[in-house]
Image (cartoon, coloured by chain):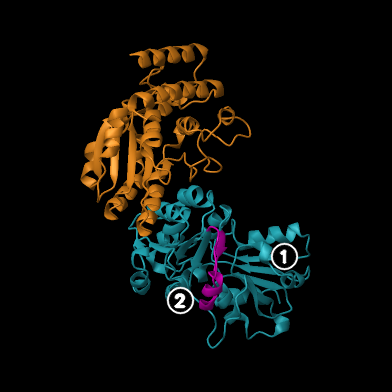
Amino acid sequence: MDIKGFDDLFAKARMRLLQLHYDSQTGHLGGNLSCLQALMVVHHLTMKPEDRFILSKGHAAGALYITLWSLGKISDQELRTYGAEGTSFPVHPSGNGIPGLLFATGSLGHGPSLAAGLALSAKQRTQPHHVYCVCSDGEWQEGSCWEALIFAVHQKLDNLTIIIDQNGLQGFGSTQEVISCSDLTPRLIPFGANVQKGSGHNSASILNALSQKSTDRPNIIVLNTVKGKGTHFEGKIESHYLPINEEQYDFAQVSHTHEQVK
Amino acid sequence: MRRELAKEILANWNLPDVFFLTGDLGFMALEEVKSTLGTRFVNTGVAEQNMVGIAAGLAREGHKVFAYSIAPFCYARPFEQIRNDICMANLPICLIGNGGGYAYGAMGPTHHALEDCAAMSALGMRVLVPAFNEDLGPMLSSFTAPTYLRLGYDDRPPKTAAPAYAPWRQLLTGSRGVLTALGPLGGVAWGALQDLPEESRPSVWVASELCTQLIPADFYDQLSENHPLYVIEEHVAAGGLAMHLAYAISQNKLPCGPLRHHYALGYPSGRYGSQSFHRAECGLDAIGIRQMILAEL
């Protein structure tokens, strides 16, 4: 699939993500929209069947479910149960019965260690598969992320790629307001990983960053993104929590359609 | 029991798919395990949350994993990783907490593990508390689910042989009620009461798994409304052996006399010392156990 074909698929996925959140009246739309393109690029253009994936920012489960739906691994009927009573697709993934999901996530800071464990196993068995892990930027306020990074660098886990969705907004403020950090890159580089940067809203940029893999160090890709991109609450903290009403849903659909045309 | 653990690992667990992780501990105990397992022995550093996450990642790929640290660092610091990453995924990982109860003595309260069994049991983990060195082999003969192993010291009386392992075992016969001890305190009670005549002492049992479904019928048969049920545990009362046992007795509608319970009281004097010092403060030493029994005569 070429980038143009992929971007058409991504546009369709983005619309389905909006519908998912509108129909289910669930929040976290902002952080789902900011990482959807990265999830789609990783799953459609990068991952091999034997590769592993960890969604450390579990609050972006909607984006992952949509990605799996776009791969034909989740049906539309299953998607319609998202967040509903008796669903197998809760707002934060359970790790049970969801294709490709290995762990329950939602509490931040778990994914990098889990991914490093998977990568260490592959190294031990000299298996060729790669492990991908998607984090949020606020998540790196968890000490466990740095524990995992130190470990992964020491173990030379070059079969691990951690992607950070750097949208700059967290639960109750911006990352700049909360910890005086709007860019994690200069903090990550001294730890010794192979750190790449890119735009999380540009497929070619994401793909390029993913292609710059080290042969002796774990890889970290920091993607600059906009939380709630294309919605009425783009770049606002409200996008972290609030569901969208019909008018806001219409606005987002029009906004994303215009962007696709451009 | 660290050296016995090392022997057990070397004898029976040097398998291609076994990993042994340590949170930077094991000096003068795990060196041979380290050299024998090679790259499958991983010092994950002073980072227990990461150690448990790494263990979960490895186990998810089919490895059997031991993860070792001082008990509180092993179960309390990474509690959420144990809950979310190990237990929710039901992975075959054995967390080894060295120094259960007050075993780290004068190292101070941060190094004591007084609520570990309750916490791990509440997560649905299999909780193992060996009483004697020989218990480690049969306890670890297989594990297919999340497991917590609380290591202590073998406190059996001199010149005695440990009875063959069973999750609940009788150590002494007696006719004045039943005493149940958690793990190593079984050895302490054994030494404290063995010279009393049978008619003056309770039967003495040791529980090495905090699972009441494993209690044998013989134990229940010895309960009586006419005599106390004694429980001793180097663990807080909440969620400990006595509460598990009382729940089982109530559920089974069994007759039982009054509960006499000695347990970890924390630090009642506000002072610190050896494991013996803390046990004495809680009536968990040989003197305190003997006094508890003699008071009923």
A10 inside magenta stretch: no
- Amino acid under label 1? Pro
Residue at (58% x, 74% y) in the render: B186
Query: Residue B258 has which mark?
Result: 1
Q: In this view, does B110 lie above or below B151?
A: above
**Mark pair 2, 1: CA separation:** 45 Å
Q: Mark 2 points at which residue?
A: B11
Residue shown at 22% from the left, 47% from the top: A192
How far across and how far down the image is residue B121, in percent? 57, 56
Give the chain ID for the cyan colour.
Answer: B
* Residue at the (59%, 28%) spot, across then down: A77
Labelled pair 2, 1 in contact (Cβ < 8 Å): no
Can the viewer see residue A199 in this picture?
no
At 53% from the left and 52% from the top, the residue drawn is B87
Extreme bottom residue here?
B159
Could you tell me which chain the residue with mark 1 belongs to?
B
User: Is residue A110 positioned above or below A120 on the image?
Assistant: above
Residues rendered magenta in the picture: B126-146
Local SS, label 2: helix
Looking at the image, residue B190 sits to the left or right of residue A37; the answer is right
Q: What element carries label 1?
A: loop
